[in-house]
C-alpha cells in the first residue's frame, strides 16, 4: 500500500493543496479510503488526521468503509425524483436489506444515491456498476438485483 | 502537432485543414453524450465503422463520435451529412441497415425517422425537427459536427480565431469593454455582468491573478455545463484564454464535478492538445509575454463547492466551506489573490461575442444594456428541460422567450397526456411557478419578479402526479444534506424546515405548521452566510405561495391531492380487474389475496400494505386505485 500511496502523492505533487486530489485517487484505487493509507498521507503531506477525516466526511465522493462488489446507485436528482426515484431506493433497501449508504454483509452490494448524473431523459435511473438502467420502475428492481446476483 | 506561433500560422494551418475537407463530403455523426451512453452508442459507433469498412467505404465516409446536440429523449441520435438525414432512437443493431440502405443505396430508413406528433408526418432533415427548429443553438450547434477529442475539428470551424483576433487587434482593456458592452451576464445563476467582474479583477492590486471555470454544476436535474464540456471543451478554453489575457492572469483552473468523469477527461485532453499547439503555455500564439496555462481540478462531490469561496477553498486543499464575502474573491480569492470565477456557459459565450461582435450579441435577448450592464439579459441561454415533459433534453433559446414556448412548442408539452402543474426553475435556490405564469418571459429579472429565478438553467416540468409538499421536502432534504454546517441558521434551520414538511407529508402536522415554516424560512434567509442558506427557503416559499391549498389539504383533511404521500393514501383493487394475479405475485409483502381468474376477488390487506406502489405499477388494466383522505 505504501508504494501505491507514494505513487499517488508523486503524481499529484507532494504539496498540501494536493490533498483533495490525493484522496480522490486513493478512493479511485481502493474504492474507499483505507485508514492505513490515510495515515500514510497524513505523514507524507504533513497534514493532520483530523483535517483528513474532515475532508473525507465532507465530500460525498469518499467512503471510509469498504464498499461492495456491485455499486448500485440511484439517481436522486430533481428530474428523477419527480418520476419516482424515492420508490426505487425504498424497493432496493427492501430487496438488499440495507439502507442507502450501506453495504450488504456479504460485501456484494453497496447502495448509494447521487444527485443527477445528467441523463435525465432516462429517469428514473439506477446505475449498476457504471451501467445506466433507464426508465426504472419498482417492479423491475428485484429482477435487476437477481440478474446481478446470477452473473456472479 | 507543431506549435502555432502567430495569427498567420493559425490561419494557414486552418486553411490547410479546410482545404483537405470537402464541404460536401459524406460523414455520419453519432451522439455519444452521457444520455446516449445508456443506449450503447459506443457499440453503435463501432458497428457503423465495421459495416462501413465491410462495404468498402471506410476511405470516404467518416463516423464521428460527437457530443450532445440536446435531444436526449430520442437518443441515440444519428445524422448523416451533407444531407442532414436525421435518425433517432438508433440502436447498435441498426448499423447494418443504415450503412446498406442509406450510405450505399441512398435510401431513407423510414422506421428511424422522427414523426411529428402534431401532423403525423415523418421528418427527414434534422433542421425541420420542431424540437430544434424553434431553438437558436449558438453554443450547442457545433456539437454535432465536432469530435470533442480533436483539436483539428475545432480549428476547422474557425476555433481559436477569436483568440487570435483578440491578441492581434485588441488591448486587454478593449476586450473588457466589449464584454461589458455585450451585456454578458453570468450563466451560473447569479447573473452578474461578466465585464464588470473582469474589470474589478484586473484593477485589483497584485501581480498574480487567476481565472477559474466553475464546472461544479450542482443543480440536480441540470446538465448544460456537462454537455458543453463534453462536447466542445475547446470553446470553453478559448473563452478562458481570452479572459486571462483581458484580466492579466497566468494561471487558470477548471473545477469539474466529480460525477462528470467524461467531461473532466475531455477538457483534460483539450488542455493537453492546446498546450501542444501553443495555444496554452508561454507566449501564446506568438504574443510576447502572454503566458497562461490551465489545470483541471476534480471536485469532491459537494453542492456548496459551486459557491465561489467554497470552490476556491477546495482548490487550496481544504473542505469547501464558504466564507463571508466582505472581501470579494475578485480582490482576494484563490490563495488570497484576485480571482475571476465564471461559469462554463459564460466562458463559452466569450469567443462567440469576440467573433460575431457586440451588436450581434445585444440583438439577442431582452432589455437595453447600452448604459447599464444590468439593464437586460442578452444572448441565448441553455436550459435543461426535464421531468414530466415529452421532449427531455437541452434547449438553447434567446432570452426573453416565454415558458410556454419552451415547454410546449419545443418540449412538446407534458408527457403521458397528464395535466401541467408547474415548472421549477433555478434548482434548489429557485422556485415553482404554476400555469398562470406560462406566458412569463424567461430572463434574469422576469422570473425573479414572479417569485422564482432563472438560475443556471434547470427547468423541471411537474404534472398532476407531483405532490408540491413532497417536492418542497425533496429540496429541503437535498439542502440539509448539502449545507456545510458552518452557520447555525442554515444547518439547524433547514433541518427543522425539513421536519416540518415531513410532518405535513406524513400526516402529523397541525395548524401551526405553516406559520412556523414561514417564520423559519425568513430566519434562514436573513441569517445565513452564503447564498445556499440565503436562497434555501425559495422552493418552500414559492410552493406555499402558489400551491397553499395543497399544504392545507395535507394538514386539515389529511389528503394528498397528488396521491404521493404514503400515510395519506390507500390502495385497493377495483372492478377493472381481470384476475391475472400479477399484483399478487409481485407484492413483496404478501398483502394481496385472491384467486386467479376470478375477477374482482382480489383484496389488499391494509395492515400489511406499505404503499410501495408495486401493484399499481405492475397492473396492466388500471385495476389498482389509490384513494386519499383515508388516514388510518
Ligand atoms: C450553493 C451554491 C452553489 C453554486 N453552484 C454553482 C455551480 O454549480 N456552477 C456555477 O457556475 N455556479 C454556481 N454557483 C454560483 C457561483 O457562486 C458563482 O456565482 C458563479 O460561478 C459565477 O460565475 P458566473 O458569473 O459566470 O455565473 C453556486 C452558488 C452557490 C451559493
Ligand atoms: S435527475 Fe436523474 S439523471 Fe438528472
Image (tube, helix red, strand yellow):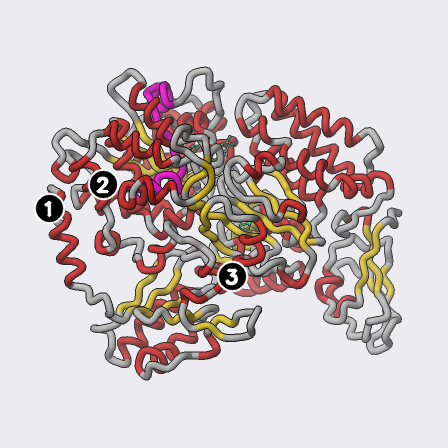
First along the sequence among labels 2 and 3: 3
* Residue at (42, 28) in percent of width and height: B372
Q: Distance between the Cα atoms at labels 2 and 3? A: 35 Å
SS label for mark 2: helix
Chain where mark 3 sits = B
Q: Is residue B6 left or right of residue B90?
A: left
Q: Distance between the Cα atoms at labels 2 and 1? A: 13 Å
In terms of depth relative to the viewer, which is nearer, B384 or B487? B384
Q: What residue is shown with label 3?
A: B73
Residue B60 forms part of the magenta stretch: no
In terms of depth relative to the viewer, which is nearer, B157 or B301? B157
Q: What residue is shown with label 2?
A: B163
- Residue B412, position in %: x, y? 57, 60
Contact, CB < 8 Å: mark 2 with mark 1? no
Q: Distance between the Cα atoms at labels 3 and 1? A: 43 Å
Q: Quadrant of residue B587?
A: bottom right
Mark 3: give few (<14), some (14-19) or many (20+) Cα within 10 Å: many
Chain where mark 1 sits = B
B445 over B115 or under it: above or below: above
First along the sequence among labels 3 and 1: 1
- Residue B410, position in %: x, y? 52, 58
Same-chain status of marks 3 and 1: yes
What range is drawn magenta here?
A: B330-351
Same-chain status of marks 2 and 3: yes
Q: What residue is shown with label 1?
A: B8
* Residue at (78, 75) in percent of width and height: B580
B273 over B342 or under it: above or below: below
SS label for mark 3: helix
In terms of depth relative to the viewer, which is nearer, B128 or A112? B128
Camera-side mark, 2 or 3: 2
* Residue at (28, 53) in percent of width and height: B149
Amino acid at each position: 500500500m505504501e508504494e501505491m500511496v507514494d505513487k499517488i502523492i508523486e503524481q499529484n505533487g507532494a504539496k498540501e493543496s494536493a490533498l483533495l486530489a490525493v484522496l480522490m485517487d486513493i478512493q479511485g484505487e481502493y474504492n474507499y479510503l483505507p485508514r492505513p493509507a490515510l495515515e500514510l498521507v497524513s505523514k507524507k503531506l504533513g497534514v493532520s488526521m483530523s483535517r483528513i477525516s474532515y475532508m473525507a466526511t465532507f465530500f460525498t465522493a469518499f467512503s471510509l468503509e469498504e464498499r461492495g462488489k456491485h455499486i448500485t446507485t440511484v439517481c436522486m436528482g430533481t428530474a428523477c425524483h419527480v418520476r419516482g426515484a424515492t420508490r426505487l431506493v425504498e424497493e432496493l433497501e427492501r430487496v438488499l436489506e440495507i439502507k442507502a449508504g450501506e453495504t450488504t454483509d456479504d460485501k456484494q452490494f453497496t447502495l448509494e444515491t447521487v444527485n443527477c448524473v445528467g441523463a435525465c431523459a432516462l429517469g428514473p435511473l439506477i446505475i449498476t456498476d457504471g451501467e445506466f438502467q433507464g426508465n426504472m420502475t419498482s417492479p423491475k428492481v428485484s429482477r435487476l438485483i437477481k440478474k446481478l446476483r446470477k452473473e456472479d | 502537432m507543431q506549435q502555432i506561433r502567430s495569427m498567420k500560422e493559425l490561419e494557414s494551418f486552418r486553411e490547410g485543414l479546410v482545404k483537405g475537407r470537402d464541404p460536401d463530403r459524406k460523414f455520419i455523426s453519432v451522439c455519444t453524450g452521457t444520455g446516449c451512453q445508456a443506449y450503447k452508442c459506443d457499440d453503435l459507433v463501432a458497428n457503423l465503422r465495421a459495416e462501413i469498412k465491410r462495404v468498402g467505404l471506410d476511405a470516404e465516409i467518416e463516423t464521428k463520435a460527437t457530443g450532445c446536440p440536446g435531444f436526449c429523449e430520442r437518443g441515440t441520435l444519428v445524422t448523416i451529412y451533407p444531407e442532414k438525414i436525421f435518425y433517432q432512437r438508433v440502436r447498435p443493431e441498426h448499423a447494418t441497415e443504415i450503412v446498406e440502405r442509406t450510405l450505399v443505396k441512398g435510401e431513407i430508413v423510414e422506421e428511424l425517422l422522427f414523426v411529428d406528433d402534431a401532423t403525423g408526418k415523418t421528418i427527414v432533415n434534422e433542421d425541420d425537427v420542431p424540437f430544434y427548429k424553434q431553438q437558436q443553438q449558438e453554443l450547442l450547434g457545433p456539437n454535432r459536427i465536432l469530435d470533442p477529442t480533436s483539436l483539428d475539428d475545432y480549428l476547422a470551424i474557425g476555433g481559436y480565431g477569436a483568440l487570435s483576433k483578440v491578441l492581434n487587434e485588441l488591448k486587454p482593456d478593449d476586450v473588457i469593454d466589449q464584454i461589458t458592452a455585450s451585456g454578458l451576464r453570468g450563466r451560473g445563476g447569479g447573473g452578474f455582468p461578466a465585464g464588470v467582474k473582469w474589470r474589478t479583477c484586473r484593477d485589483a492590486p497584485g501581480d498574480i491573478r487567476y481565472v477559474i471555470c466553475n464546472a461544479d454544476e450542482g443543480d440536480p436535474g441540470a446538465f448544460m455545463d456537462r454537455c458543453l464540456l463534453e462536447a466542445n471543451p475547446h470553446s470553453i478554453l478559448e473563452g478562458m484564454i481570452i479572459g486571462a489575457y483581458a484580466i492579466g492572469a497566468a494561471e487558470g483552473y477548471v473545477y469539474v464535478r466529480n460525477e462528470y468523469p467524461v467531461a473532466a477527461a475531455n477538457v483534460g485532453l483539450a488542455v493537453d492538445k492546446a498546450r501542444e499547439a501553443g495555444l496554452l503555455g508561454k507566449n501564446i500564439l506568438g504574443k510576447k509575454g502572454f503566458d497562461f496555462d490551465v489545470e483541471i481540478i476534480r471536485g469532491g462531490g459537494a453542492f456548496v463547492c459551486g459557491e465561489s469561496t467554497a470552490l476556491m477553498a477546495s482548490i487550496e486543499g481544504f473542505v469547501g466551506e464558504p466564507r463571508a464575502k466582505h472581501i470579494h474573491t475578485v480582490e482576494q480569492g484563490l490563495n488570497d489573490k484576485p480571482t475571476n470565477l465564471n461559469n462554463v456557459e459564460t466562458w463559452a459565450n466569450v469567443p462567440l461575442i469576440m467573433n460575431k461582435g457586440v451588436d450581434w450579441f445585444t440583438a439577442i435577448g431582452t432589455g437595453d444594456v447600452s448604459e447599464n450592464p444590468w439593464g437586460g439579459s442578452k444572448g441565448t441561454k441553455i436550459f435543461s428541460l426535464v421531468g414530466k415533459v415529452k421532449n427531455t433534453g437541452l434547449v438553447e433559446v434567446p432570452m426573453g422567450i416565454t415558458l410556454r414556448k419552451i415547454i410546449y412548442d419545443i418540449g412538446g408539452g407534458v408527457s403521458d397526456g397528464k395535466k401541467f402543474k408547474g415548472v421549477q426553475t433555478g434548482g434548489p435556490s429557485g422556485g415553482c411557478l404554476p400555469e398562470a405564469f406560462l406566458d412569463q418571459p424567461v430572463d434574469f429579472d422576469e422570473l425573479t419578479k414572479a417569485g422564482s429565478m432563472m438560475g443556471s438553467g434547470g427547468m423541471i416540468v411537474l404534472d398532476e402526479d407531483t405532490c408540491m409538499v413532497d417536492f418542497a421536502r425533496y429540496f429541503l432534504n437535498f439542502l440539509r444534506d448539502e449545507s456545510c454546517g458552518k452557520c447555525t441558521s442554515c444547518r439547524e434551520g433547514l433541518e427543522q424546515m425539513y421536519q416540518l414538511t415531513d410532518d405535513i407529508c406524513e400526516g402529523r402536522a397541525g395548524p401551526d405548521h405553516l406559520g412556523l415554516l414561514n417564520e423559519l424560512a425568513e430566519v434562514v434567509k436573513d441569517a445565513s452566510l452564503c447564498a445556499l442558506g440565503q436562497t434555501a427557503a425559495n422552493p418552500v416559499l414559492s410552493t406555499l405561495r402558489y400551491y397553499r391549498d395543497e399544504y392545507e389539504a395535507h394538514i386539515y383533511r389529511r389528503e394528498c391531492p397528488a396521491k404521493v404521500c404514503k400515510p395519506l393514501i390507500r390502495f385497493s383493487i377495483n372492478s377493472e380487474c381481470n384476475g391475472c394475479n400479477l399484483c399478487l405475485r409481485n407484492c413483496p409483502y404478501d398483502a394481496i389475496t385472491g384467486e386467479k381468474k376470478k375477477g374482482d376477488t382480489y383484496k389488499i390487506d391494509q395492515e400489511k400494505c406499505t404503499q410501495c406502489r408495486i401493484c399499481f405499477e405492475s397492473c396492466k388494466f388500471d385495476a389498482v386505485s389509490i384513494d386519499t383522505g383515508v388516514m388510518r
